């Protein structure tokens, strides 16, 4: 999956500028993307594990260089998570809650979670270009509307199409709302809770909490508790 995302980035004129972060940007340095692999367990413990802390530390170093002075406002992290079964993983309450908490957290950089299976990879390897991905999505969009899990590779392609900022979906992209609705029904309430959370704590407090991630920290504990809205 990582190779597919990287090939799509390269096809859209993004080049790697930092191998430790797997960080890509364009010639104008107007947008940045990081690509990282996470296990399901690491996703569920995203705000607590060492991998996230190391990414944040390295990202902070990059943000202090003059060459990338706008990196803080224009960076996205693609979090790639391999699962055994897409339907089971997507409908799992814990996974839903983790995805929502991670993607709704905008501190440091935007975050996009992409679930995938090893079986679905092979059918996508030749579609890591905008036109090929678009044509593939357009060819089966009616089938997807009836059963969004009819094909692992198609579901993964739809995830990529929705979450890549520079990609335009076929006209019936509104059907993807049937996916998002499963874990976004409580979005309004969650947005209010998250807004209150960020107003409550200063940037310095959040920065210290995320750099020294521990569940007993008050701010991190409160952020994790917000996920209970989806149970």
Image (tube, rainbow, N blue to C red):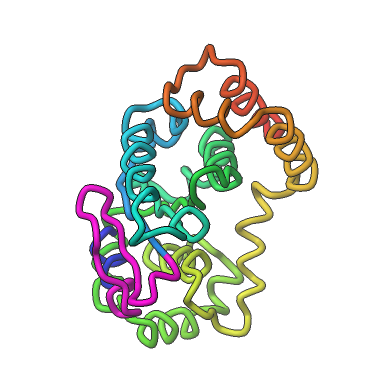
In the image, residue 73 above or below residue 219: below
Over which residues does the magenta segment extend? 8-31
Q: Name the side, left or right, on which 33 lies relative to 112.
A: left
Query: Which residue is located at x 44 percent, y 22 percent?
Result: 213
In the image, residue 196 above or below residue 209: below
**Is residue 84 at all visible to an observer of this figure?**
no
Residue located farthest toward the left when viewing the structure as drawn: 19
Query: Which residue is located at x 42 percent, y 27 percent?
Result: 211
Q: Quadrant of the C terminus?
A: top right
Q: How many marks?
A: 0
Q: Position of residue 59 (x, y in %)?
A: 36, 45
Instruction: Verify whether residue 98 appears in magenta.
Output: no
In the image, residue 128 above or below residue 148: below
Q: Quadrant of the N terminus?
A: bottom left
Residue located farthest toward the front when viewing the structure as drawn: 66
Camera-side residue: 40 or 197? Answer: 197
Q: Position of residue 167 (x, y in %)?
A: 48, 77
**Is residue 74 at all visible to an observer of this figure?**
yes
In the image, residue 113 above or below residue 101: below
Q: Name the side, left or right, on which 178 lies relative to 80.
A: right
Quarter of the image for residue 132 reads bottom left
Q: Position of residue 147 (x, y in %)?
A: 56, 65
Q: Position of residue 161 (x, y in %)?
A: 48, 71
Quarter of the image for residue 123 reads bottom left
Q: Name the side, left or right, on which 216 lies relative to 68.
A: right
Instruction: Verify whether residue 12 appears in magenta.
Output: yes
């Amino acid at each position: 999956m990582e190779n597919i995302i990287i090939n799509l980035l390269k096809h859209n004129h993004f080049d790697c500028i930092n191998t430790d972060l797997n960080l890509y940007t364009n010639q104008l340095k107007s947008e940045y993307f990081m690509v990282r692999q996470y296990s399901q367990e690491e996703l569920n413990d995203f705000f607590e594990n060492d991998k996230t802390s190391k990414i944040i530390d390295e990202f902070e170093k990059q943000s202090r260089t003059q060459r990338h002075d706008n990196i803080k406002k224009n960076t996205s992290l693609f979090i790639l998570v391999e699962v055994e079964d897409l339907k089971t993983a997507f409908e799992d309450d814990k996974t839903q809650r983790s995805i929502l908490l991670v993607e709704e957290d905008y501190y440091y950089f935007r975050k996009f979670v992409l679930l995938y299976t090893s079986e679905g990879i092979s059918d996508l390897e030749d579609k890591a270009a905008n036109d090929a991905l678009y044509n593939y999505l357009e060819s089966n969009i009616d089938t997807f509307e009836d059963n969004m899990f009819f094909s692992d590779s198609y579901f993964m392609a739809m995830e990529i199409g929705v979450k890549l900022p520079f990609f335009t979906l076929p006209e019936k992209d509104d059907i993807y709302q049937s996916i998002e609705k499963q874990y976004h029904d409580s979005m309004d309430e969650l947005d209010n809770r998250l807004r209150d959370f960020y107003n409550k704590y200063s940037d310095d407090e959040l920065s210290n909490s995320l750099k020294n991630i521990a569940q007993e920290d008050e701010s991190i504990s409160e952020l994790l508790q917000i996920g209970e809205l989806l149970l």
